[in-house]
Image (cartoon, rainbow, N blue to C red):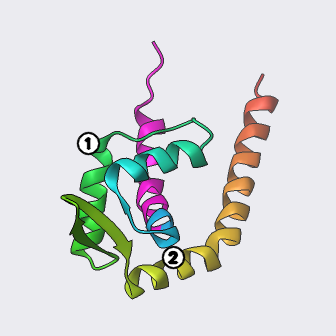
Amino acid sequence: MHDDVLNNEMRKGFLKVMLLHIVQERPSHGYEIIQEIGKKTHGGWAPSPGSVYPALDFLEKRGYIQCEEVDRKKVYSITEKGVGALDQIHARRQQWIQELNAFFGDVLEENHDGQ
């Protein structure tokens, strides 16, 4: 059986950024956020409530998002601090892509040469 622990950990690393992006687009409650991640990943990933809600709590406690109750649902929206964080992430995105491509390109070459 294939062990997806590392794959899941990598996704968790991206989850907070995805949450910020989604609530920047429009204020949303948790279930809407989970559905939106599923749509944006073309069905490739729909995180569990057990990972989404702790991540939302993390972001709220640090001031990146805020929460208000609307019709007995917690609705999350981005704060100025969250917008600033996303701006920084987007500014560095191309650099990270280049670094990852360089690393994985080297890894793929090493694996191919070792066959």
User: Between residues 111 and 44, which one lies in front from this camera angle?
Assistant: 44
Q: Earlier in the sequence, mark 1 or mark 2?
A: 1
39 above or below 18? above
- Answer with left or right where residue 38 lies relative to residue 91: left
Task: Locate the C terminus and report the quarter of the image it occupies.
Answer: top right
Residue occupying image coordinates x 59% and y 49%: 40
Residue 78: x percent and y percent?
39, 76
106 above or below 78? above
111 above or below 83? above
Q: Which residue is identified by label 1?
A: 50
Residue 25: x percent and y percent?
52, 69
Residue occupying image coordinates x 52% and y 42%: 38
- Answer with left or right where residue 96 lies relative to residue 85: right
Q: Residue furthest front?
A: 71
Task: Locate the N terminus and report the quarter of the image it occupies.
Answer: top left
| Start-end of magenta stretch | 1-20
Residue 86 bears which disc, if any? 2
Residue 82: x percent and y percent?
41, 79
Q: Residue furthest top?
A: 1
Residue occupying image coordinates x 75% and y 47%: 106
Q: Main secondary structure of the magenta part?
A: helix
Say if the magenta span includes residue 85.
no
Residue 25 bears which disc, if any? none
- Answer with left or right where residue 21 lies relative to residue 72: right
For badge 1, the amino acid type reads Gly
- Circle 2 packing at 10 Å, graded few (<14), some (14-19), many (20+), is some
Say if the magenta span includes residue 10.
yes
For badge 2, the amino acid type reads Leu
Residue 55: x percent and y percent?
30, 57
